[in-house]
Amino acid sequence: MAVILPAKPLVAPEGAILSNPRRLLLEQCKTIRELRQIHAHLIKTGIFLNLPYVAENLLESSALVVPNSIGYALKVFAQLPTPRTEAYNILIRAFILHHAPESALLLFEQMIASSIPPDKYTFSCSLKACSRIKTLARGRQIHSLILKFGFGSQEFVINSLIHMYATCGEVRTARVLFDEMPVKGVVTWNAMFAGYFKAGDWMEVVRLFREMLESGDEFDQVTLISVLTACGRLGELELGEWIFHYIEKHGLKDNLNLVTCLVDMYAKCGQIEKARSLFEEMPFRDVVAWSAMISGYTQLNQCKEALELFHKMQMTDVEPNEVTMVSVLSSCAVLGALETGKWVHSYIKRKRMQLTVNLGTALMDFYAKCGCIDNSIEVFEKMPLKNSWSWTVLIKGLASNGQGREALKFFSAMQEADEQPTEARLDAEEDEKEVSVSHHSEKLAIAFGLIKSQPGTVIRVSKNLRVCTDCHSATKLISKVYKRDIVVRDRNRFHHFRNGNCSCNDYW
């Protein structure tokens, strides 16, 4: 039903539309038809041209509240005789919300060219647009304008600058801005955490959190999610346990995102039983929680458990996503579970999921290891994007299925496509890297663990390269001789060594 506004309150200063136009427009106006009716009334009564704040409230309603009305908002904006800063801010924000950051930046540039003075909200939104499209050059231009207009010391604006620089890959510049701030709120800290997070610099995330603790500044749940993720990637179980106890002590275990991060952290640190215990305690599990648990089993080579949990997931209303599918396909490849893997492939087709590099490569690897090399080739040819790993998986699959000539043919095609060499070469490069980092660093780490820890204590090692054959064999022997459990997390998976055996069954 259209909103019918009495004429007198619209004209009288004490009337509803003048006394509180924002509330009237934002709460009562729900459709474009109602927008048009109010717009026409404002023009007819002269309010639209004579009272800018009322016109801006109409613009805000059409740009940010009423669904599918951004086009109408542009018409409203075009009718403003002299758009003020507030009007530009509304439309810039609307463009960002409607996934049009380039339009937001063009409007910002038009605003500056028209000599309309920007405020802190203008700069914050414009920097967010730069972050969305990762345009560092324009971000730097906006930084110069921030200094020119005197906003260089405002925390709200600096937080946006830190986020922009970090998102655009200039983490060092972001850190300089961060360090220059005399007082840092939790938003500032989280902006810096987000920068390291996006860069995958997990060591710096942990260092920054320790620095935050020493400063006495308070952190929030967003902080903890970043740090827990870093703990999982680094195998920082001690810090992860500290956060777990903090969450318990402060009654935060009802937070789905936090508990899911705990599950993921414990799984990535090889503590799969603790991860499963937390998972089972969750009153509600979304697809991220299910995927974290299934992925944890897969990484530890407990593929049977991964598939059993996936079958339980299928009995719920939660639909799997790409992360779930990649983990399930990896487990199917190890177990030779052809039927389950085929079901996953049919599900991908049925749901019209995009065949990304990760998903497509996992499918290829599954089919190749199950002896269905023709299916693997078919998936490869349908993938819109391929990387060196995709080519390598296919070539290895062909070779292991007795199709050496086809493997050589695809190897030549890979070279013509200017892709990187095969995994054999990659492994050689990683061996060279091992030499440059103190000759097989996991051996030194294990030796240090044997010296410094109590007998019977689990030794944990994390590294960002693949474990070489020599270190793998040596660690199996050490676990048997010293009767120690040793958990090594490399680039590919977890290796749990016990009594001279490894959980990967010498396949990694």
Image: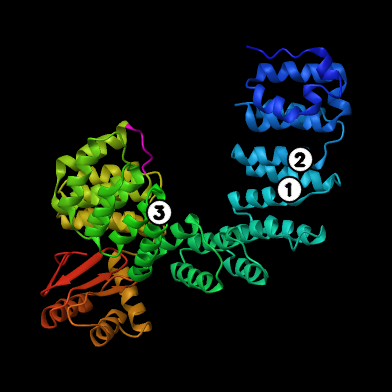
Dominant SS in magenta: loop
Which residue is drawn at the image coordinates 71% and 38% (left, top)? 90
- N-terminal of the pair, mark 1 or mark 2, is 2
Residue 402 in percent (x, y) is at 14, 55
Disc 2: which residue: 88
Compared with 40, 25 (above or below) is below
Rounded to the nearest whole Å, what is the CA distance between mark 1 and mark 2? 8 Å
Residue 373 visible in the picture? no
Disc 3: which residue: 251
Q: Residues within 10 Å of mark 1 (few under 14, many from 20)?
A: many
Which stretch is magenta?
Answer: 351-355
Q: Examine the image and state in which quarter residue 302 appears.
A: bottom left
From the viewer's perspective, is 102 left or right of 508?
right
Residue 37 in percent (x, y) is at 73, 15
Rounded to the nearest whole Å, what is the CA distance between mark 3 and mark 1? 38 Å
Q: Of the residues shown, which amino acid type is indicated by label 3?
A: Gly
From the viewer's perspective, is 91 left or right of 417?
right
Q: 261 or 6: which is nearer to us?
A: 6
Q: Residues within 10 Å of mark 2 (few under 14, many from 20)?
A: many
Which residue is drawn at the image coordinates 48% and 61% (left, top)? 197
Which mark's residue is nearer the viewer, 3 or 2? 3
Q: Of the residues shown, which amino acid type is indicated by label 1?
A: Thr
Q: Of the residues shown, which amino acid type is indicated by label 2?
A: Tyr
Disc 1: which residue: 122
Which residue is drawn at the image coordinates 20% and 51% (left, top)? 331
